[in-house]
Image (cartoon, rainbow, N blue to C red):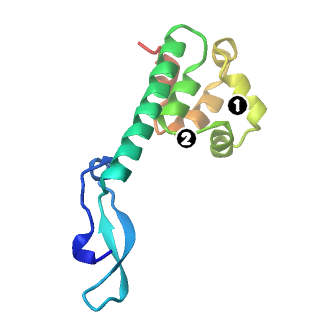
Amino acid sequence: MKKQDLPQDESNLKSANMTEVVYVTDENDNYTTANSIGWEAKKLALDESMALINERIEEARQNVANHIVSPIIYFMELNKMDLAVLSAYVGMWQWRVKRHTKPKIFKTLSDTVLKKYADAFGITVAELKNFDGK
């Protein structure tokens, strides 16, 4: 694709102030790189994946509000993490992190443990403790 023909269709990349580096050819038919904020196919794929992510976040929020899971699940989804990633951030075994996602266990956690989670999520311990999903 020629550099001047590179599509610049608005997508979630632009709203996140990001661009994607792609290979294009310049006026001398030499390969070079250029930045793109997306094109139609990429936009559709990103929009679909963001909709799915937002559904998961909303489901997690509702589950916290209904006392099915602890706030850890909501913030994990909000930060696009899974148990493996979160356990690496907080320096705990995955089974232990999974146990902390139960509301009954979450309520017993010390501020020291909660601080590890809060730091991983970029929030305060108070925000983590007081999040009720509403």
Q: Secondary structure at mark 2?
A: helix
Q: Amino acid at mark 1?
A: Val
Left or right: 90 in relation to 40:
right
Q: Earlier in the sequence, mark 1 or mark 2?
A: 1
Left or right: 32 in relation to 104:
left
Q: Is residue 53 above or below residue 42?
A: above
Left or right: 131 in relation to 116:
left
Left or right: 40 in relation to 92:
left
The residue carrying pointer 1 sits among few (fewer than 14), some (14 to 19) or many (20 or more) residues within 10 Å by Cα, namely many
Q: Position of residue 132 (x, y in %)?
A: 47, 14
Residue that lies at the very extreme toward the bottom in this rendered image? 28
User: Circle 2 sits on which residue?
Assistant: 120
Q: Position of residue 25 (x, y in %)?
A: 33, 82
Task: Tell me where residue 30 sits by quadrant.
Answer: bottom left
Residue shown at 65% from the left, 31% from the top: 113
Q: Position of residue 17 (x, y in %)?
A: 29, 54
Using the numbered discs, state the Cα–Cα distance from disc 1 to disc 2 in whole angstroms. 13 Å
Q: Amino acid at mark 2?
A: Ala
User: Circle 1 sits on which residue?
Assistant: 97
Residue that lies at the very extreme toward the left in this rendered image? 4
Q: Which is nearer the eye, 57 or 8?
A: 8
